Image: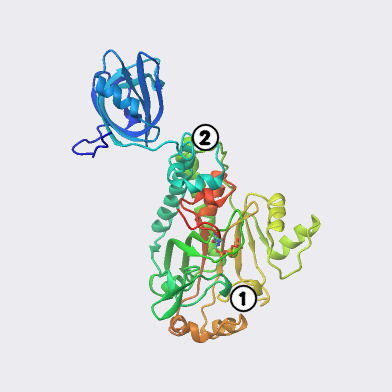
Amino acid sequence: MTVARLGDWRRTHQAADIRPEMEGEEVVVMGRVGDIRDLGGIKFFILHDVSGFVQVTAPKQKTPQAILDQISKLTQESSVAVRGKVVRASQAPRGVEVVPSEIKILNLAETPLPLDPLGRVKANLDTRLDARALDLRRQEVRAIFRIKNVALQAIRERLLSLGFVEVHTPKIVATATESGAALFPISYFEREAFLSQSPQLYKEVLTGAFERVFEVGPIFRAEEHDTTHHLNEAISVDIEVAYATASDVMDILEDLIVRAFKAVADRCGSELETLDHRLEVPKTPFPRITYTEALQILEKAGVKIRWGEDLPTPAERKLGELVGGAYFITDWPLAIKPFYTMPKEEDSKLSESFDLMYDWLELASGGTRIHQHDLLVRQLKSKGLNPESFKSHLLSYRYGLPPHAGWGLGLDRLTMVLTGRENIRECVLFPRDRRRLTP
Ligand code: ATP
Ligand code: MG
């Protein structure tokens, strides 16, 4: 069997663009082979490409034997190029077919496939992720990533229109930002370095130069636990804004979330249908409850959390039932927020911080940051961190860094909400977790 190169063949049309009105036209289509059938007098297969599909039909009496032989050799998921004539055919799906005059088999897929890319045979998530290259060809899976793309585009366009500068900060870093335990060490020549947990410190420093910055990039967390919403590598959308406070950046976040929902609702109707997911654009303003109020709501429902403790997942689930939709939890105890979090002026046990929740799931965390050098050093020490290791970072605080606020939004978690998926692994092309480092 010859497996051909592309050579000088080029597509003239995408599959979905082939229409009955084009009857008689010669076209070249390229794509993956779906269902193949042999009905005695006629052989046909479905050719899928990124636009959709078209049927390729070879009536035995009118088709050269060489082409019939090629079709007989085809396997599902092989890549092919077909040159042929468009024929109006009421019995064909979409009322049209391509009758081949030449076929190039570009790559023949081995059989059996480890999973059914047409999705008729259900596979469990691990099997799907092991064969992710094939799994990603499924319409349902592609729908997730198209939605993720559309949401991110809406967010990025809005931030750019608000005068934000998109930045890229180092992912190889010398110190922790969130908490020492969750760092991945790497060997960096003769020293130890770490994979960045968050662009936090860099984006803060950048407000001194650009005032409004954002970054879309990976964060690395050495989370040991196996949950439906944690990965060891995730994509975070981070912003930081000079001369702003927590409430200003909450307004920005709320607006972006609504825009992302609207963009997906407007532009991804067929993807949402494929996923059988109904999207409801959240109403603004999002409810804003304080941490202390959240504890009271939980206590009334019989869930007791001691003031000062972080909300464990079961409590978040309960709160999701009781409040629901998109809402903010503000004014967290300072002690459970990172060292750069600004204490509340009226009560230094509290902080100017917030989490954005969607039902039970934390989507984002943010707040006003400390911009005063001495206070930052005090907070570092109170968290048991050594200010010496933050020496170069602290420099900009000595040189007039403006007051600033920002947040980090988990893009993969936002995608869970937008697509109605319950496991974050479905929303990441090649997820990294405690057990999975390949593919
Ligand atoms: P959680 O409490 O859910 O573990 P976190 O408070 O540690 O999250 P932050 O440091 O606040 O996370 O990070 C900002 C956002 O980045 C989170 O709200 C979340 O959407 C996303 N994020 C953080 N860690 C992960 C992770 N391990 N996997 C996927 N997304 C994450
Ligand atoms: Mg958080």
Residue 67 vertical position relative to residue 429 in the rendered view, above or below: above
For disc 1, the neighbor class at 10 Å (few under 14, some 14 to 19, many from 20) is many
Q: Which is nearer the eye, 364 or 90?
A: 90
Residue 238: horizontal and vertical position, in percent? 48, 63
User: Residue 174: image x %, image y %?
Assistant: 46, 77
Numbered label attached to residue 428: none
Asked whether residue 23 appears in the rendered view, the answer is yes
| Residue annotated with mark 2 | 273
Q: Amino acid at mark 2?
A: Glu
Q: Cβ of disc 1 within 8 Å of ligand 2?
A: no
Classify residue 251 by image quadrant: bottom right
Q: Is residue 94 above or below residue 283?
A: above
Occupied quadrant, residue 17: top left
Q: Is residue 155 above or below residue 393?
A: above
Q: Position of residue 273 (x, y in %)?
A: 52, 35
Q: Which residue is mark 1?
A: 343
Ligand 2 quadrant assignment: bottom right
> Which mark is in front, 2 or 1?
2
SS of the residue under disc 2:
helix
Instruction: Specify whether 295 is left or right of 62.
Output: right
- Residue under the image location 54 percent in, 85 percent down: 386
Q: Find numbered disc 1 in the image and state the secondary structure of the residue it sits on.
A: loop
